[in-house]
Image: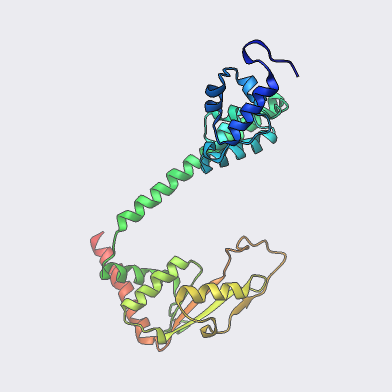
Amino acid sequence: MTSISGKYGDFEALREQAVALRRQGLSRRQIRDRLHVDNNDILNRLLEGEPPPEWTKRPRAKDDLRDKARELRLKGLTYDQIQVELGCSKSSISLWVRDLPKPVRRDSVEQAKLASRKRWEHELAVRDEARQETKAAASREIGTMTDRELFIAGVALYWAEGTKDKPYDRRETVAFVNSDPGVIQVYLAWLDLLGVTPERLCYRVMIHASAEVEAAERYWADLVGVEVSALQKTTLKKHNPKTARKNVGEEYRGCLVIRVTQGADLYRRIEGWWYGIVFSAQRTS
């Protein structure tokens, strides 16, 4: 170790004083002013191995950023790359990682690819933010629906997704199948508006046999507010390994079938309501 003479006198004696002050809870600035040490390198050597007191530490959020910056630096990222990842200033990053080894310089082709990927990720994030804002704004435009608005929406929804009577297949029953929980909730709100009581509703899950059947049953039962035991026997679809399915994973819960018992009269009214909408639209066009 290089000896310290002149202005700072005996190094070991000065270090003892610095360590004692540190253990009393003084900050670096306070120790520097108390001992009249205006050289940061010497102050670092005097306090080497002594942890700072708790009150001088940065807030937790800053500590998290610092830890993440050090982690990224050890992975070989540059200051610019860390700044893109964390959104903090390069001066802060420099302070946090200056004791770590510099990353090995990548070749220009690899750097160009990395920069391009970062730009594209940023562009995707901007697009997604704009996408979500458009959806949120559109949602606010709907506001609170009146009963009549829900009534018409429900008729159109049923005619799009519900079972229908055919001349070659007489089926005046009210049955509805869908995999979208939002659609199911709107449909149930519509049935409630029509005065269909919960006792008249039968629920059944349709799902591929290779899926998480019990989890899907619990999900749909919770959504409609019944016990799993109240569901009718689940319909299992055979899985064809030769066919690549996209509806897989934890988010796949199959479809829910909702049938209204004693629904022939209700079906006839639904069909009439639908054609009333059609005729009204034709008259206004």
Q: Nearer the viewer, residue 125 or 194?
A: 125
Residue 176, given in percent of the width and then of the height, sits at 45, 76
Most extreme residue toward the right, as rendered?
1
Relative to residue 203, is residue 39 drawn left or right? right
Residue nearest the observer in this picture, 196 or 161: 196
Colour basis: rainbow
Q: Position of residue 178 (x, y in %)?
A: 49, 70
Instruction: Please identify the quadrant where the N terminus is shown.
Output: top right
Q: Name the residue located 73 percent from the left edge and 27 percent from the top edge.
A: 104
Which residue lies at the image location 30% right of the left edge and 71% below the top edge?
A: 151
Front-lying residue, 172 or 31: 31
Give the quarter of the image for residue 225: bottom left
Q: Look at the image and tell me in which quarter the C terminus lies.
A: bottom left
| Residue at position x 51%, y 74% in the image | 220
Q: Is residue 140 above or below residue 74?
A: below
> Is residue 20 positioned above or below 146 on the image?
above
Name the residue furthest top: 6
Left or right of residue 242: residue 194: left
Above-or-below relation of 242 to 27: below
- Which residue, as the protein is rendered here, is positioned at the far left? 284
Residue 244: name its quadrant: bottom right
Instruction: Please tell me which residue is depicted at 56% across the width and 33% down the height of the picture.
Output: 84
Residue 186 in view, yes or no? yes
Q: Position of residue 40 (x, y in %)?
A: 60, 20
How many discs appear?
A: 0
Task: Indicate the position of residue 198 as horizontal and vertical percent values.
Answer: 40, 83
Viewer-proximal residue among 142 and 91 = 91
